[in-house]
Amino acid sequence: MEKLGLNEIREKYLSFFESKGHLRLPSFSLVPENDPSLLLINAGMAPLKPYFTGRQVPPKKRVTTCQKCIRTPDIERVGKTARHGTFFEMLGNFSFGDYFKNDATKWAWEFVTKVLNMPVDKLWVTIYEDDDEAFDIWTKNVGVSPDRIVRMGKEDNFWEIGTGPCGPCSEIYFDRGPEHGCGSPDCKVGCECDRYVEFWNLVFTQFEKQEDGTYKKLDHPNIDTGMGLERIACIMQGVLSLFDVDTIKSIRDKVCEMAGVEYGKDPQTDVSVRVVTDHIRSTVFLISDGVNVSNEGRGYVLRRLLRRAARHGKLLGINGTFLYKLADTVIDASEKAYPVLEENREMIKSKIKNEEERFAQTIDAGFSILNSFLDDKLLDNMEKNTIFSGNDAFKLYDTYGFPIDLTREILAERGIEIDEEGFNREMEAQRQRARANAKMTEVGWEDTIADALSNVAPTDFVGYDSLESEAKIIAIVTDAGSAKALAEGNSGILVLDKTPFYAESGGQVGDVGKVCGEFTEAVVTDTKKTPDGKFYHIVEVKEGTFGVGETVTAKVDIRTRRRTQANHSATHLLDSALKNKFGRAVSQAGSLVNKDRLRFDFTLDRPVSNEELAEIEADVNRQIAMAVPVVWETMPIDEAKNKGAVAVFGDKYGDVVRVVTMGNYSMELCGGCHVGNTSEIGLFKILSETGVAAGVRRIEAVTGFGVLTEVYAMQEVLNTTAEALKCAPKDLAKKAAIVMDELKKAEAKIEGLNAKLAKSSEGDILNSAREINGITVVCGRIDGATVDALRKIGDDFKAQTPCGVIVLASSDGGKATFIAMATKEAIAKGAHSGNIVREAAKIAGGGGGGRPDSAQAGGKDVSKIDNALAAVYKMMEELN
């Protein structure tokens, strides 16, 4: 059996099924398209669901793919075993009502025995226990010996998720040999040990499960197969671990080189090496497919993977940022199969580096948060201050990203243990939620609109050239599903055979307008489309009743469209201006274009200065003033890319694309609506530039009359402000400087008076000292004093007193402030500023804490300040 590389196996598989009449499709994005039921693509067939359900017509009835997948429900097990990973590739060949069991089994056997040359005496086949048809095909048609076929139950060899398409499975296993078995006399195919490895699953989708639990035979059964690329690579390369597969091993070895460790020498070190190796693969591919770091959804998955990898890098002793450098090894290993990795190499590395740097800050902040937890709330609930809540340990880990092992180490130094059982309980609850969500996300087959339009032909869009057209109503949809008519006063969906209305996509909102008949009128409030190109108009019927088959006139609101397309064209100019300013590594990360304004997200690891924004704005306006013609043409996607057309990151494109060109300044793949000449944009004005995610910035801007609207609004602000400051608008800057100078002088004067007040009270306060348990204790109150003033008195006291504790309070604006300080000798006798000030603040309805030598707290009830200070003396008397 030849030892084939992972990349070789992928190519051999896809080429083999191409020779069997299959269309090779590139891997779909990890981000599901038009499937809200999925967070990320987690199976090879997931992107093909619309073809299996009949909602979309497949490009061909036979398809083969190698699909990128991400699964994270068991992320905590990654690294601890040699088998678990979050990123994997799934090989598959699919039939949408074309061939069935006979060809599927025949080709599977041919590939593994003739192409991969796997020894027949090492192969086993499993079938569903009642699937006699599969048994006959395997034995009589394919030629597999009956004693190499194992019948298994429904749990193992029948695929179904709730109601809907389902069917029996047939799996192919490889026998690694008895030396890898568990030693049990009952060890056989299906055993949980490492001897028998299932590597290819053939699903025969031939039934539809009904609500009553019965199975209805499908008129056109389908084939859905899946073979894990990493798993078959393990078998072909004679290794037991996916981390020993050639392409993955290259990443693993690079991690070891960076850490200066040797893989296989220390089990704990190996765990960290495996975590980093797996997670950097997932990270690179997620970012490549347009996922940005955030605190929710896909972005949270990415952040968690990145931070877990960074943390294990630190455990390996790797100092500073390193994952962004490791990304090069991942890209080098896979860029031939996924060219987009090379195209976006610098952008991917930049995003990884940004998040690594942020995580370093998080680690530092985590120490502060942990200390705050200890001081503010947790010690109050601890028995003898020795147990730290498992719930709060989990919160630190899950919400703040603070690693549990760091929490454990810090607490151990203080003689505090974590409630491990409580922490593990929370972790398991999270895993259960993740697993439940994972199961739920595999369903998502129901969609009222898609179902209602399953037999409707794609819409003929004529809106590039015309904003009005005659059309025929070919479908009506309401909340209840398909309908024959839509009456006055009702809302619903009208589907036309052709339309001038642009459907929401590519960041551009859907058109609005009217659909009219001889005696009917409906207002179109939005336009959308299904993934397979069926436009639907969301309408409110104002007059008459619309019926299927009627001829109507579809009219786009001209003013809204013109303003929207001006903003859309401006985003193309803005994209080019940003690239001109910051380099080609800057890429679009999202956009929204409507009639009022444009919003443009782009990748950059720092804020844009006001000077840079002015330059970018001027660059765009120059192109507008030059009246550059805007032209568009369709061409094959490869030709468009060769010409230098920019593809919007994360968007999906077919074989033939529309290229929008603005002179020599901008060339992008775009299906949206645009002006005919840049002069029609009028003027471009940036309103704001902000950060929206790690390494992603957002510019909001307006064009044309939108600029005038902003000018009028700003003029109103200037006039109102000038009136308040009693000056002319043109003198606002000068007047503001004078007012700010006067304010600073007043603040300085107030601060000086406070200092004098505190100083004058200092003597009286220090003279009120009491000796308690060998410690000099001072308590005092100076209303209106700042925290700095209180601290100055405390520092003076500590300088004069070898063994002392001082607690001072102040009220200002209805709030109480407390500070406490203790000398080293007082601390040695048991005094703790954090504990003292916290208990005192509680009496005033507040809380706080801090270090043994210095602490601060606040209170809500200033009337209880004196009571709080009196309690300090009692606390010191009770000090053991």
Image (tube, grey):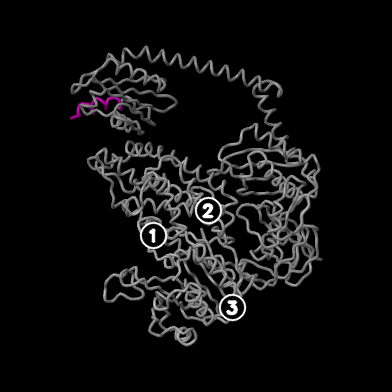
Residue at 34%, 68% in the rendered image: 194
Q: Which residue is mark 3?
A: 97
Q: Which residue is mark 1?
A: 432
Label 1: which secondary element:
helix
Quadrant of the image containing the N terminus: bottom left
Question: Are the residues at dot 3 and dot 1 in contact (C-beta closer than 8 Å)?
Answer: no
Q: Amino acid at mark 3?
A: Gly
Measured in 3D between alpha carbons, the distance from the residue under mark 3 to the one under mark 1, in whole angstroms, is: 36 Å
Asked whether residue 485 appears in the rendered view, the answer is: yes
- Is 157 or 813 nearer to us in this picture? 157
Measured in 3D between alpha carbons, the distance from the residue under mark 3 to the one under mark 2, in whole angstroms, is: 39 Å
Q: Which residues are magenta?
A: 868-880
Q: Which mark is residue 403?
A: none
Label 2: which secondary element:
helix
Q: Main SS of the magenta segment? A: helix
Q: Is residue 375 left or right of residue 590?
A: left
Verify whether residue 286 appears in magenta.
no
User: Nearer the observer, disc 3 or disc 2?
Assistant: 2
Residue at 38%, 38% in the rendered image: 369
Asked whether residue 210 appears in the rendered view, the answer is: no
The picture places residue 431, in percent across and down from the top left corner, at: 39, 58
Q: Which mark is residue 332?
A: 2
Question: Are the residues at dot 3 and dot 2 in contact (C-beta closer than 8 Å)?
Answer: no
Label 3: which secondary element:
loop
Q: Amino acid at mark 2?
A: Asp
The picture places residue 834, in percent across and down from the top left corner, at: 30, 31
The picture places residue 49, in percent across and down from the top left corner, at: 56, 68
Q: Amino acid at mark 1?
A: Gln
